[in-house]
Every structure is written in structure tokens, then in C-alpha cells.
Image (tube, grey):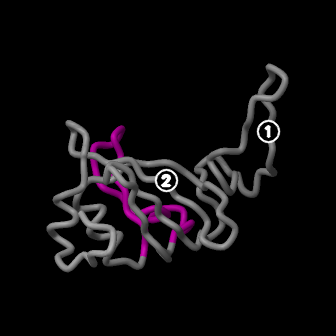
Amino acid sequence: MSQDKNIQNLDEFIAGLKYDDKGLIPAIVQDFQNNEVLMFAYMNAEAVKKTIEGPLAQFYSRSRGKQWIKGESSGHTQTVKEIYFDCDQDCLLIKVEQKVAACHVGYRSCFFRKIEDGKIKIISEKIFD
């Protein structure tokens, strides 16, 4: 795909993404205002299409074996603002407006821990139980 070529056919673009052997593509979800990485998930072709159509981010749950809308049960939805894809077309970056939190255990970001001096440190406040 040429750098200056606009994508005319969305279905061809979605089909041309490089999915793994299970039909999934990784997606990094980032806050569109401050670039905080909120979560990592997988998408199948249908989730990619529905996310592009918007307004809410959709993913594929490997553990449940089904597609899901982020926040469908918690209300902590992600309104899609921008979608990027990498040079190899095997990873997506979804920039969203996050309602409340992305992490199901109560933190705004799923990346609320870090390894520092050989120890695990929690680096953010829990915002819900």
C-alpha cells in the first residue's frame, strides 16, 4: 500500500490486515487526549469493522470466544476518536475517549503496575471496586 494512497474500500482494507492464525489482530487502546495506554486487546475482522463504524470500540474475547463492546456491562465505554495501523498492517492503535476506566479491576489503565528495583509497584489509584 502506497503511503500517499487513500484507502477507498474499507472492506478491502479490513480483509488486508494481517490477522493471526485464529483470525485476530492485536489492538493497543490509548487515551486520545493524553496518550495514556489504557489497554491491550484483540480484534477479529468484524470487531475492526464495527469499531471503524463507531462510535464505540469493540473487541474479541479469546477467553469467552465472542465479540464484545468495551463497557457493555460496566458502562465504562470507549468512544473511538482515531484509528491507526502499523507499517506491517498487523497491529492497530485505537485512540479513544474513555468513560471512567478501562481496567476491569478498578484502575483507569490496565497498566497500573511497574517493576522498579526488582519489585512490583502499583503506580496509580484504584477508582472503583
Establish if 44 lies above or below 55: above
**Observer-nearest residue: 13 or 3?**
3
Query: Which label's residue is closer to the chain start, 2 or 1?
Result: 2
Mark 2 = which residue?
28
On screen, residue 114 above or below 18: above
Point out residue 9 in the picture as x, y percentages from the top left corner: 17, 76
- Nearer to the camera, 86 or 124: 86
- Local secondary structure at mark 2: strand
Is the magenta region chiefly helix, strand or loop?
loop
Observer-side mark, 2 or 1, equals 2
Amino acid type of the residue that numbered disc 2 sits on in the rendered structure: Ile
Give the Cα distance between marks 2 and 1: 21 Å
In the picture, measured across the screen, residue 124 lies left or right of residue 62, that is right
Q: Which residue is mark 1?
A: 122
The crowd level at tag 2 (other Cα within 10 Å; few <14, some 14-19, many 20+) is some
Locate residue 38 relative to residue 69 in the image: left or right. right
Segment colored magenta? 56-78
x, y percentage for residue 122?
79, 38
Residue 79 counted in the magenta span: no
Where's the N terminus, which quadrant?
bottom left
Q: Who is closer to the viewer here, 9 or 109?
A: 9
Q: Estimate the x, y position of residue 126 in percent, counting from the top left.
A: 77, 51
Residue 71 in the magenta stretch? The answer is yes
> Which residue type carries mark 1?
Ile
Left or right of 128 on screen, residue 51:
left
Q: Secondary structure at mark 1?
A: strand
Quadrant of the image occupied by residue 97: bottom right
Q: Identify the residue shown where x is 62% and y is 55%.
A: 37
Q: Residue at x 16, y 59 (%)?
A: 15
User: Which residue is at the front of the view, 125 or 128?
Assistant: 125
